Amino acid sequence: HLAASKATTTMHTGMIKTYLGTFALSILLILLM
């Protein structure tokens, strides 16, 4: 159970980082335009 929980947490963290990265890129593009 612990291993599965850790994997799920890692996956969620990766998704959040990807989402934030995309969001930041969108803001940068808007500011540059």
Image (cartoon, rainbow, N blue to C red):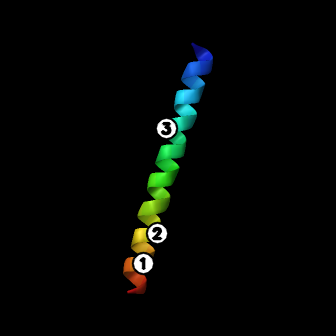
Percent of width and height locating residue 15: 48, 45
| N-term-proximal mark, 1 vs 3 | 3
Whole-angstrom CA distance, mark 2 to mark 1, is 6 Å
Percent of width and height locating residue 23: 41, 62
Image quadrant in which the C terminus is located: bottom left
Three-letter code, disc 3:
His
Under circle 2, the secondary element is helix
Residue 28 quadrant: bottom left
Vertical placement of residue 9 versus 25, above or below: above
Three-letter code, disc 2:
Leu
Q: Which mark is residue 25?
A: 2
Three-letter code, disc 1:
Leu
**Furthest-top residue in this view:** 1
Q: Which mark is residue 3?
A: none
Vertical placement of residue 23 versus 8, above or below: below
Q: Answer with left or right where residue 14 lies relative to residue 33.
A: right
Vertical placement of residue 27 versus 9, above or below: below
Report the residue marked by disc 3. Answer: 12
User: Crowding near pointer 2: few (<14 within 10 Å), some, many (20+)?
Assistant: few
User: Crowding near pointer 3: few (<14 within 10 Å), some, many (20+)?
Assistant: few
Q: Answer with left or right where residue 1 lies relative to residue 24.
A: right
Q: Which mark is residue 29?
A: 1
Residue in the image at 46% along x and 56% along y: 20
Q: Answer with left or right where residue 26 lies relative to residue 18.
A: left
Residue 3 quadrant: top right
